[in-house]
Image: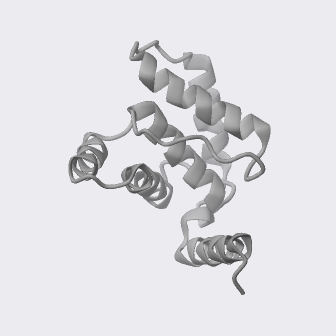
């Protein structure tokens, strides 16, 4: 469950007419903070971002699933499922066994995924891929 302040910041972004990706950025930021605080870890910066985007979709941010070819079919399905869950509106209780398993697995992961150097490396790599996709050198 996202923190109240994160939800408020995302709502403020929406009210200001900012893009869904900007609204979702608040959830990604929260996830990075959780890793840095030591609440849990992540295998990579991409995983931390994915967790944040999933939370954003479930919280009601109208963030479409990634384009075909950008990620795996399973990721696209999960993103579509998260988006659908937010639109249904019913707060089904999460399976406690599954929740514990996820948290336990994340706690075993490294905290270095949220380090400034790891995030910088990821940002540079993502920017290079965008340039390549757009046909720029």
Residue furthest out toward the front: 135
Q: Position of residue 21 (x, y in %)?
A: 45, 53
Which residue corresponds to the image point at 54% horizontal and 48% vertical from the top-left? 40
Between 69 and 58, the one lying in front of the other is: 69
- Residue 61: quarter of image: top left
Quarter of the view holding residue 65: top right
Query: In this view of the protein, can residue 41 be seen by the observer?
Result: no
The residue lying at 57 percent from left, 53 percent from top is 48
Count of labels in the image? 0
Residue 127 in view (yes/no): yes
Answer above or below: position of 114 versus 78.
below
User: Taking 60 as reference, is 6 above or below it?
Assistant: below
On screen, residue 64 above or below 97: below
- Left or right, 12 with respect to 2, comes to left
Q: Residue 32, percent across and down?
A: 48, 58
Looking at the picture, the colour scheme in use is one colour
Q: Nearer the viewer, residue 51 or 73?
A: 73
In the rendered image, which quarter contains the N terminus? top left
User: Which residue is at a point 55% across and 71% down the rendered structure image?
Assistant: 115
Q: Position of residue 107 (x, y in %)?
A: 60, 45
Locate residue 68: give its quadrant. top right
Can you say which quadrant of the picture contains the C terminus? bottom right
Q: Position of residue 24 (x, y in %)?
A: 42, 49
In this rendering, would 56 be left or right of 71?
left
Identified at 56% across, 45% down, the residue is 51
In the displayed structure, does residue 5 sit left or right of residue 99?
left
Residue lying farthest to the bottom in this orientation: 137
């Amino acid at each position: 469950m996202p923190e109240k302040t994160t939800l408020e910041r995302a709502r403020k972004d929406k009210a200001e007419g900012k893009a869904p990706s900007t609204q979702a950025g608040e959830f990604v930021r929260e996830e990075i903070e959780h890793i840095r605080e030591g609440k849990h870890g992540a295998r990579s910066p991409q995983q931390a971002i994915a967790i944040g985007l999933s939370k954003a979709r479930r919280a009601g941010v109208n963030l479409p699933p990634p384009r075909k070819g950008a990620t795996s079919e399973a990721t696209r399905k999960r993103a579509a499922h998260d988006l659908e869950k937010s639109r249904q509106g019913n707060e089904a209780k999460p399976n406690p066994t599954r929740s514990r398993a996820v948290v336990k697995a994340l706690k075993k992961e490294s905290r270095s995924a949220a380090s400034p150097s790891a995030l910088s490396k990821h940002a540079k790599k993502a920017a290079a891929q965008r340039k390549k996709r757009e046909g720029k050198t």
